[in-house]
Amino acid sequence: MSTTPLEINTPLDGATTSSRASGNPLSSTQITDYDHRQTVGKITVDNPKMTCRGVNVYYGAKQALKNVSLDIGANEVIAFIGPSGCGKSTFLRCLNRMNDTIPGCRVAGEIRLDQEDIYDRSLDVVQLRARVGMVFQKPNPFPKSIYENVAYGPRIHGMVQNKAELDALVIASLERAGLLKEVEKRLEEPGTGLSGGQQQRLCIARAIAVNPEVILMDEPCSALDPIATAKIEELIDELRENYTIVIVTHSMQQAARVSQRTAYFHLGDLIEIGETDQIFTNPRHKLTEDYITGRFG
Amino acid sequence: MSFYLFLTLLLLSSGCYYLGRRRAFTVAGDHVRNLHSLPSYYGAYTALWCGLPALLVFAAWTALQPSIILELVTNALPPELRTLPPGRLDLVLNDIKNLVNGNIVSSAPDPAILAAADHYRNLQLIGNAALWIAVMSLAIAGAAHAWRAISPKLRARNRVEQVVNLFLVISSTIAIFTTVGIILSVLFESILFFGKVPISDFLLGLQWSPQTALRADQAGSSGAFGAVPLFAGTLLISGIAMLVAVPIGLMSALYLSEYATPKFRATAKPALEVLAGIPTVVYGFFAALTVAPLLRDIGTALGLQVASESALAAGLVMGIMIIPFVSSLSDDVINAVPQSMRDGSYALGATKSETIKRVLLPAALPGIVGSILLAVSRAIGETMIVVMAAGLSANLTANPLQAVTTVTVQIVTLLTGDQEFDSAKTLAAFALGMVLFVVTLILNIIALHVVRKYREQYE
Ligand SMILES: Nc1ncnc2c1ncn2[C@@H]1O[C@H](COP(=O)(O)OP(=O)(O)O)[C@@H](O)[C@H]1O
Ligand SMILES: [Mg+2]
């Protein structure tokens, strides 16, 4: 162990150890202290919205996430960074149990939203996903009108009593997603006819409409041009007031611009977590430093 | 005889392939880079020149030779035979041909006929010899031409490509012309029919009893050609079939694409498709021998009058048969809805059935409609089940418990058995076929159009 202080040290379970023993050759050559990769940095926060402890995820026999523990603070923007395939999306999908929809995917560990275990049997997944919204990498508006796209969530959750309330909710959501001005006149036109950046903001509006507490964003700007990206980043900054936001990003500049805390993942491990400023100016783990300085990733 | 010629030609032309290839190497001076095309293209070029023209002549000759020989033999017959009426003359010529082929002849052969048979045989020998000579010299000439033409500059690759292109064009036109031929023949016969029976009587008449009299004084020769009962029967049976096939097919498609594990789907889908592969005659006796009696027993128990051959039995079984048309195609289109649509819906907290109802079905609807229309045209065209299970009596009824008949069944009954080919009865089959063709064509066009429109949405 060459690394510095650890706030938490969860022992590895049997399955994890055995799968590492047969580990792949790439990791064993690149990384020396592979067997006991523990997180560097402070994983806890003072007022956590979500707490994750010892999260392991398997796709069939393959382990994609190894013993990840971290807190997500209320009204913060936390960024997940790391090379492709390191498990960022996998971890994000654990937070609203979207992994349940993937055949062969198994999640072990503990994840709590406001102290409530989201993997508890008694928990209603449908309610959970209404509280933890998600925005995907590729904008995926339904092939319906702009209005219907935003009204989708409120309708299925029965959040409104009548058409007037629904109208108001749709307008408010579009407004908060910064899209209202652009689409005011054409709410009945198909959402798929908008530009990529507009589509992504429509998807954000759609997520906001069900009044979530946490919004998960999986590389929300990777399919967008720089101007559309700037708009979304601005939006994220505004949304922080009312929501907790978890964003996966490939762009370190973006992480630096929008987030307060950053977590660096590597091959299924959470390597380092800390204040965004500290991660980018003074990374404590060698792997983080290599990634930040562009040596790989 | 001609088989050996064909074989020789084939051998010759494959020999030419190697010769042409060798020649290409030679003219290239063993620097294949100098050649315009790969050596094998020069081989193919030579082989085609050797084989194709010879083959064409061979085919034309084989098609024409018998009639020419027959003509010559007829002209050489003694006058008393030559002036026989056409029917008798045909018999004589038949005897000659039978003699030539060594078959048994109708009567003791006449010397004149024996002489004619000899003449025929001689002509045949001469013709075949000439054929061999012509085909072989053409093959060799073609090969020689190609041989001379081979040079590094010759664009053998492009020439071969042209020939391949030509073959493909010919193959596709064969299919198209066949369809056109069928349409035209059906059309002409229908026009003949409408000359005998007014089109309004046919399309609007409520009475179908196509028995026409062979003799004018024959009884039971009403000859009513009102097709409405047939169309009503077709509609009734197809309707019942669709009532069975659409809900079951659609729901199994939804189950397969959204709920089943991939492993289950991989086995269940082909298993469902087997339903479409069962010969319809098997469905037919299943309907007639199992389903129809069962329905009658149930009907009797309920105090209902069920005919032993009922539209219901035929429709139910036909519905089972076309389930895979609906389920398999619908499953494909539902699967083609991008996963991101499902993810988007689930991430908003929708359940599976809400996602299906609000996102998948609307998105896949055009494709589903297309699959249903294809199934309908299959149902309308289906014959065997109806013949066996629904009967032949042209009742005009909406009661599914009675026997009805359909357009296709009547076509079959009109054309089976001994018929006068130009009677209204026979021609009516073509008119029915014409209407059926038009209806299914329209349905298919709509289906294809709808399916295509659906495709544009996600590509
Ligand atoms: N549906 C899946 N089935 C099997 N393996 C998967 C699946 N999704 C992701 N993985 C694997 O899990 C690992 C982490 O993937 P992912 O979370 O998508 O990485 P990231 O988002 O950081 O690029 C990768 O090795 C990937 O191959
Ligand atoms: Mg990802």
Image: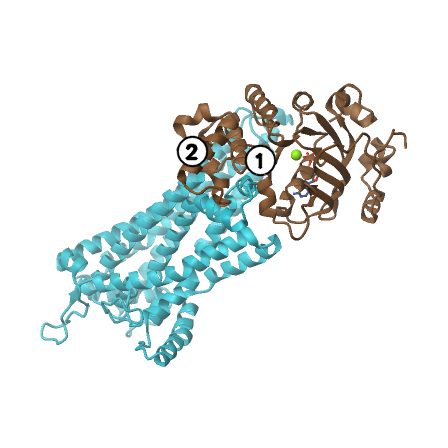
The residue carrying mark 1 is B40
Q: Nearer the viewer, residue B5 or B349?
A: B349
Using the rendered image, report if marks 2 and 1 lie on a common chain. no
The answer to whether residue B420 is left or right of residue B14 is: left
Q: Nearer the viewer, residue A255 or B153?
A: A255
Q: Position of residue A160 (x, y in %)?
A: 46, 41
- On whether ligand 2 comes within 8 Å of the CB at mark 2, the answer is no
Q: Position of residue B366 (x, y in %)?
A: 41, 45
Q: Amino acid at mark 1?
A: Ser
Secondary structure at numbered mark 2: loop
The residue carrying mark 2 is A190
The answer, for residue A143, to whether it is visible in the render is no
Disc marking residue B334: none
Do residues under tags 2 and 1 come within 8 Å of each other at their CB atoms? no
Q: Residue at x 39, y 53 (%)?
A: B372
Task: Tell which chain the image draws in brown.
Answer: A
Which tint was used for chain B?
Answer: cyan
* Quarter of the rendering containing residue B25: top right
Q: Position of residue B6 (x, y in %)?
A: 47, 50
The answer to whether residue B299 is left or right of residue A171 is: left
Q: Nearer the viewer, mark 2 or mark 1?
A: 2
